[in-house]
Amino acid sequence: MGLLIAGLFVWCFTHLVPGLMPGIKSIMVEKLGENGYKGAFSLAMLGAIVLIVFGWKSTEPVFLYHLGPIVHKFALLLMVVSVYLIVVAQMTGRVKRVIRHPQLTGVAVWAIAHLLMNGDLRSLVLFGAILLWCIVEIALINKRDGQWSKPDSPSIAMEFRNILVAAVILITIAHYHIYLAGVPINH
């Protein structure tokens, strides 16, 4: 569990530094340059992911709750919403007129879905930490950026493209989930 917690700490701390301690980011950009800072950030994220993966795999699940098949089906629906929000964050979509931070919101929905489906301690630590990070990150970005300027509405064709891309990604995740996470979707 220690590796998992260490990885989550590195992930959250590295992401939260710009919002909580902008002076540190400025010093790093000044010393390393913009690309050097991005490289250091990327290496920290890679390290965090490695720690999280090895921490996850090395921790035996201790089951705390089971919410049943109806909740599991609802959580799968949340995953559809999550993937769509994460896809739209990278593209143009009407949802960006309603949700200011579709990527972070999508990750938060992903975390909630996984908390509903997985009632073990390591899942609670992993997905609970990611959910908390998303909430804090959204609040910090809103404070930093101030007033929200909503984008223009894209065409219907763009919306269909978003749905198609999200569907392909969702099918791919569903197919490879056992290999990526070590857990089948229908467990």
Image: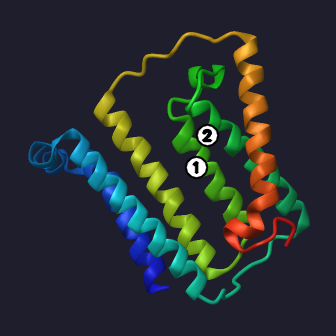
Quadrant of the rendered image containing residue 184: bottom right
Q: At numbered mark 1, what does the secondary structure look like: helix, strand or loop?
A: helix
Residue occupying the point 55% across, 10% down: 152
Picture coordinates of residue 16, whole percent (x, y): 32, 53
Picture coordinates of residue 127, whole percent (x, y): 58, 65
112, above or below 56, in the image: above
Which residue type does callout 1 highlight?
Val
In the drawing, what numbered circle is on residue 86?
2
Residue 14 in sight: yes
How crowded pointer 1 is (Cα within 10 Å; few <14, some 14-19, many 20+) is rated as many
Residue occupying the point 64% across, 36% down: 87
Please state which of residues 161 and 71 is positioned toward the viewer in this rendering. 161
Residue occupying the point 43% across, 42% down: 138
Give the alpha-carbon distance from disc 1 to disc 2, as whole Å.
7 Å
Tag 1 residue: 107
Which residue type does callout 2 highlight?
Ile
Residue 12 in sight: no
Work out whether mark 1 precedes mark 2 in sequence or the reverse, and give the earlier one. 2
How crowded pointer 2 is (Cα within 10 Å; few <14, some 14-19, many 20+) is rated as many
Quadrant of the rendered image containing residue 113: bottom right
Picture coordinates of residue 2, whole percent (x, y): 43, 85
Count of numbered circles on the image: 2
55, above or below 68, in the image: below
Quadrant of the rendered image containing residue 84: top right
Q: At numbered mark 2, what does the secondary structure look like: helix, strand or loop?
A: helix
Q: Is residue 54 left or right of 123 when viewed as pictured? A: left
Picture coordinates of residue 54, whole percent (x, y): 52, 79
Q: Is residue 154 left or right of 150 when viewed as pictured? A: right
89, above or below 46, in the image: above
Q: Are marks 1 and 2 in contact (CB under 8 Å)?
A: yes
